[in-house]
Each structure stands twice: as structure tokens, then as C-alpha cells.
Image (cartoon, coloured by chain):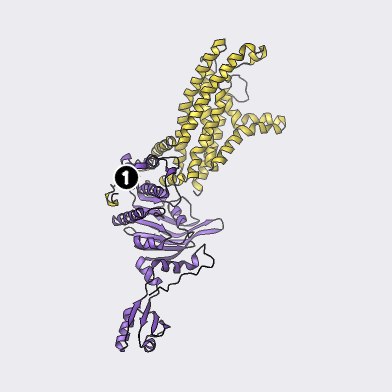
Amino acid sequence: MIEAHDLTKDYGAKRAVDALSFVVEPGVVTGFLGPNGSGKSTTMRLILGLDAPTAGTVTVNGKLYRDHQAPLHEVGALLEARSVHTGRSAYNHLLALAQTHGIPKRRVHELIDLVGLHDVARKRAGTFSLGMGQRLGIAAALLGDPQTVMLDEPVNGLDPEGIHWVRNLLRGLAAEGRTVFVSSHLMSEMALTADHLIVVGRGRLIADTSVDEFVRRASGNVVHVRSPQADELRDLLVAPDVTVTVVEPGLLEVSGLSAPQIGETAARHGVVLHELMPQQVSLEEAFMDLTRDDVEFKAGAAPVATTEAAA
Amino acid sequence: MSAPANLERLPRTPGAGRVTQARVAVSEWTKLWSVRSTRWSLLTAFLFTVGLAALACAVVSHHYPQMDPREKARFNPLEVNLAGVQLAQLALGVLGVLIITAEYSTGMIRASFTAVPKRLPVLWAKAGVFGVVTFALMLPAVLIAFFVGEAILAGHHIDVAFTAPHVARVLVGAALYLTVAGLFGLGLGAIVRNTAGGIASFAAIMFVLPPLMNVLPSSWNQAASPYLPLQAGEAILSTAPGGHLSPWVGLALFAGYAAVALAAAAALLVRRDT
């Protein structure tokens, strides 16, 4: 369990994390989502005590990270920036970390096999590809059999097989009752892995919600209705918190009512419907819509995506 | 690849698996020997100490018959014998800097401080392991250099016996001096956190500052210079009595400089972001 309260971090005049409060629960995969530069990596460094917060606190399993007697048993972390001496072999890197906690060599060998680095374990980490480096980082994160696993952009540089492996790994760890906190700037990746989402933009909390709820809320409850009696139907549906727009003759876009509600109203008044379609937006679109105002580095004139999805 | 569910669970008994200073020292031992820079720097320091001693003694020995009486009177066999120490201290100081700055340049420091978030045990373990390794290696190096060098000088009967006054103190002192030089480098490296900056500050304080003192009025220079790290430390290598600082006081002062550097590094280490 990770609990952040009003977590704030300034670097000089720049506020990287701004009064962030959230709880990461055990037993599910929690996605930590935000555009590049939104403060995800900084938040993870604050959780590990690598950087000190300007204000606020963050605890892991009830304590500040540095107050744990055996921190690698509490949290296993993969940071986005490489954290390996390039001149040291993968085996010695893991061994040196294991030795700080008295973790046996056997465990180091097991993890090397688990992440598939057996053939290169004695090679210097500086010769590793991005994907191999990620596997080594994941091995380091799991070394202490941690209650909480925190991975910053774990699928970066992995091939499709590796991405699939990481997804299953994260799901398996959560199924064992562990807290799994995984960041990404790719919504589509989160859609496949995460159950819960914490979305940040420019260091501020934008959403803290389940993946399903996130899409539902972002799609704004829009329903497309096609009817030969469109004008009649529009008059029936209009209400203070319901908007009806005519997309084209015979096609209405209704927001504020669910598809069943519209269907029942139509049936009560004998209005014929040809189509009744709730408009699902993809997670990617929902994410972009939500963070549109919070993207740090925006492409100049590129049109911003809208929630309007192709039917 | 096996499924994560196959991961063996570690025993979770309270107390087991805690981070202790001894465990961090074992970890630092592994770190020290698993990078090439350690082996190269220590090998260099060892070879300089022994090799230059043999070379210097051979050159002097060859030249001795042609020396004028004044030169012969000033001749100090032990000084010639320890010629390699000057270069060895550079190799060890650089290694001391690298032990910590390479962790910053590669990002390893984040892994180190994630495993040991209290941080200070990492610095103490580095200092302890590196100090012990350096002394354990340089003491035999100095002794080998002495016996090889003196054997060469013995050809002209200008050698000095191990049992002669001051000799044992100078030899043990030389190994201690080199150890302190390495630890001074470690402290400076931990303060500046950058390899180039660490090596530059080590070289500047040790080797550039002393000649720079000549710009001061000579009375100031003479009053201050013996207290600089290099001169203070070298008091332990002196066989002539009546130096400004006695041998052990000089070495203690040099060790004090290293201790201050490490203490400053420790104070910064727990405060700074990584």
C-alpha cells in the first residue's frame, strides 16, 4: 500500500509534483498515467526517498520508505532512468543488492532465470540492449520478494513477447495480493494491464478511478440515435441537464441520458428507432481529452483529438 | 519463462533480512571487485610502488660511483626506495574518487540508496572496505619495494637495514599514507559527485596547492605549508628528525583532512536529492 498526502516537489522555481494525494491499494494493478513530464518519475523517486518532498508525505506499507528495516522486502522498484553500473555484470549487480539484505545467492540465480538473462548474466550491463536492461531492472525489483512492486515505464524497449510477459507478471503479482503500481505514458498499455488508474498532468491529480469508470466518465455519456421521427424524439428528450444536437437529418446526439433511458422514452411515445448507439471512446482518447490542458510539451499546430469517436 | 506465481517466497520473520552495516560492507566488497577500474588502479599502484623502487635504486646504484661527496652525504636510500609512492597515491586517490562518482555517473547510486535508504552505511562501508583493501595491498607492496630496492643498493653497500632507526615506521607509515590518500579521494568524490570534478579537486589540493603557496609572503608560506595535506602526510616518510610536524602528528593531520572530507560528504549525502 502506498499513501501520498499533499505530496509536493519543487525543483528551483518549477513545481514538478503539486499537492498530490492518492492511495495505491494491494491486490490490483494500479496504473500511474500522465503525459511525459507530468511528474510520474518524480513521484516515484519521492516514494523511495531518493528525493525529499518540498511538502507533504508519502508512506509505503505504513512507514516512510527509509524507516523500513528491510526496504527491499517492502518495495521493489524499477526506475525509468537506468540504475546500473555499466561496468558490472548483471549477476554481480544483483548480488551486491541482495547482499545488503542478506538475500542468498540462490535467489539471485532464480531471478536471472526468471527474467531470461541466464546467457548474459556474466556480461557487463553496459553492453545490454534497452530491453535486457529493463529485464535486469525487473529482476532487481523482485529480488526482495517485495509486498509492493513499483515499475516506471516497464515495457519501454521490450519486444512484444517481453511486453506480454510483463503484463502477465504484473497481473500475477497483483493476484498474489501485492500492491502493483506501474507508470506509463501510453493509455493503451494501461488499458490492458491496469484495474485502477491514477492520472496526473503537470504534477496535479486529474483522476483517481477504475479503468471502466474512467472511460465512462470521459465519454460523457453520449448516445447516437437514428430515427425517422428525430424531431419528435428531440422534443421528448430535452431536459435541463440533457443536450440534444442534430448531427444530420434523422441523427441525434444525446448527452446526459443513457441508451436504455432513451429507448424507454421512445417506446412509451411510440417513436420508431433505427439505431441506438452508446458512443464509447477509446482509453487513449479519454486520456488525451482529460490531459489536454495539462500537457507540458504540446505539438504546435497539430489538431487536438476530441472525444467524438467514429460510430 | 516461468510464471511469477513460481517465485519462491522469502522467509518473512522479523529481523531476518534486515539491512545491517556488516551486510552493506559485504555488498561494497562485491561492488569493489566487480568493476575493472578497481583492478587496474590497484595493480597500477602496486606496480608503481615496487617497479619504480627497483628502477630508482638501480639508476642511483649505477650512478653512485660518479656522485660527488656532497651528493653522497645527502643520499638517503629510503627516499629513493619510496619513489613509487608518489605515483601510487595518484592512482589510489583517483580510485577513491571513482568508487563513489562512478555510481553517480551510471545511476547505480539510485539502486544503492533504494537498497539502503539510510545512505550513510553505504559511505561508511565504502570507506571501510576500500581502506582495508588498500592497506592490505600497499603494505606488502612497500615491503617488497624495500627489500628489492635495498638488495640492489647493497651492491654498493649503500643500503639501509630494516632494523635501522625509523625504517619500520616509514614503511608502515607509507602504506598508511597511501590508504589515507585513497580515503581523501573518496571523501572529495562523495562531495562533488562527479568524476572529473573529484579527480581535479584531489589533484588540486594535493599537488597544485603546495607550489601555489609560493605566491604568499615567505613567512606565511613557511607557517602554513607544513599543514597542507600533502606535506603533513609526508612527515611520516621522513627519516630526518626535526621536521615541522613530527611523523605521526603529520599523518594524523592528513587523516584529519580525509575525515573532514568524509564527514562533509556524509552531511551532504543525507540531505541531497539523488
Instruction: Tell whether B207 sits left or right of B263.
Output: right
Tag 1 secondary structure: helix
Q: Can residue B117 be seen in this view?
A: no
Task: Find residue B207 and report its horizontal and vertical position in percent.
Answer: 61, 32
Q: How many marks?
A: 1
Residue A311: percent from left, percent from top:
37, 75
Figure quadrant of the N terminus of chain A: bottom left
Quarter where residue A279 is shown: bottom left
Image check: B171 left or right of A232? right
Q: Colour of chain A?
A: purple
Query: Alpha-carbon neighbours of circle 1 within 10 Å: few (<14), some, or many (≥20)?
Result: some
Please name the residue that numbered disc 1 is placed on.
A113
The residue depicted at 63 percent of the width and 28 percent of the height is: B226
> Is A28 above or below relative to A290?
above
Query: Residue A185's x, y, as percent?
Result: 43, 60
Q: Outermost residue, right direction?
A: B217
Q: Which chain carries label 1?
A: A
Q: In this view, does B29 lie above or below A150?
A: above
| Horizontal and vertical percent position of residue A263 | 31, 82
Drawing shade for chain B: yellow
Question: Between residues A273 and B137, which one lies in front from this camera angle?
Answer: A273
Which residue type carries mark 1?
Asp
Residue drawn at x 62%, y 16% is B75
